[in-house]
Amino acid sequence: MDKSKRFFLKGAGALLAGMSAYQATRASEHSSPASQRKYALLHDENRCIGCDACTQACREVNQVPEGVSRLDIVRTGPHGEYPNQTYHFERQSCQHCENAPCVNVCPTGAAYKDPQTGIIKVDEWKCVGCLYCIAACPYKVRFIHPVTRAADKCDFCEQTRLSKGELPACVTSCPTQALVFGDLLDTQSGVYQLVRTQPVSRDKESLGTSPKLFKIRAAKGEVIL
């Protein structure tokens, strides 16, 4: 990355005073064409065993440094009393919101929704590291990449795998098929069928963000001791 460009953009942070006018320009920059796909991911917590194969695959494929993570599996428990105890495993990663707060607050247009895929992306060349997106994200899944110094997060492996016609690394590495990825606009896709037929939920729906990370909640946990 051209560091001089990065420094120039950092200096241009003074343009925040004219942020409203800039936001109007930025909105048109990524507005065409209309979305052709609407990618989404479903995590079946009843199938998840907390093995962390997905997190390791994500780190390796996307070259995520130690100390930060695009994807975490949060383990809680044990629940209940011995010998009938269970653990619960929940995925935490970018929700790829339809109405993304991170996009709304970004002063440079570095955070945007891809009109062709619906994926929330980061243009690292435009990112000035202002932390606005990190503060605005209600799911707390963004971070500053220690090498690029730009905001980073899950992008469904858009650059490393989707562009090659492959599924996200977390999906292909899951040994229990707890993750299903696909296009919500494709009525034949697995994710569309599951969202339509299963009791799915999304985190913090009341905020109006319309996340595209769906979950089938575990009723009793996944690992019985």
Image (cartoon, rainbow, N blue to C red):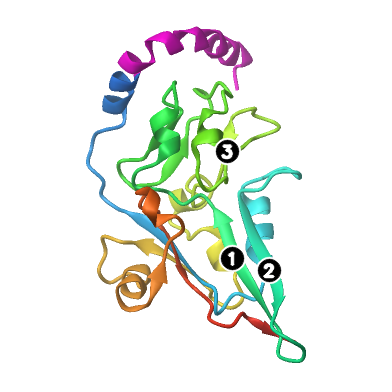
Q: Which amino acid does label 2 sit on?
A: Thr
- Front-most of residues 31 and 74: 74
- The mark that comes first in sequence, 1 or 2, is 2
CB under 8 Å between discs 2 and 3: no
Residue 152, labelled with which disc?
3
- Front-most of residues 198 and 171: 198
Characterize the local packing of mark 2: few (<14), some (14-19) or many (20 or more) Cα atoms within 10 angstroms: few
Q: Which amino acid does label 3 sit on?
A: Asp
Q: How far apart are marks 3 and 1 (CA)?
A: 21 Å
Q: What stretch is highlighted in magenta?
A: 1-22
Question: Circle 1 sits on which residue?
Answer: 90
Q: How far apart are marks 2 and 3 (CA)?
A: 26 Å
Determine which quarter of the picture holds residue 107: top left
Q: Which residue lies furthest to the front in this view?
A: 81
- Quarter of the image with the N terminus is top right
Specify whether residue 3 is painted magenta. Answer: yes
Q: What residue type is labelled 1?
A: Glu
| Whether residue 51 can be seen here | no
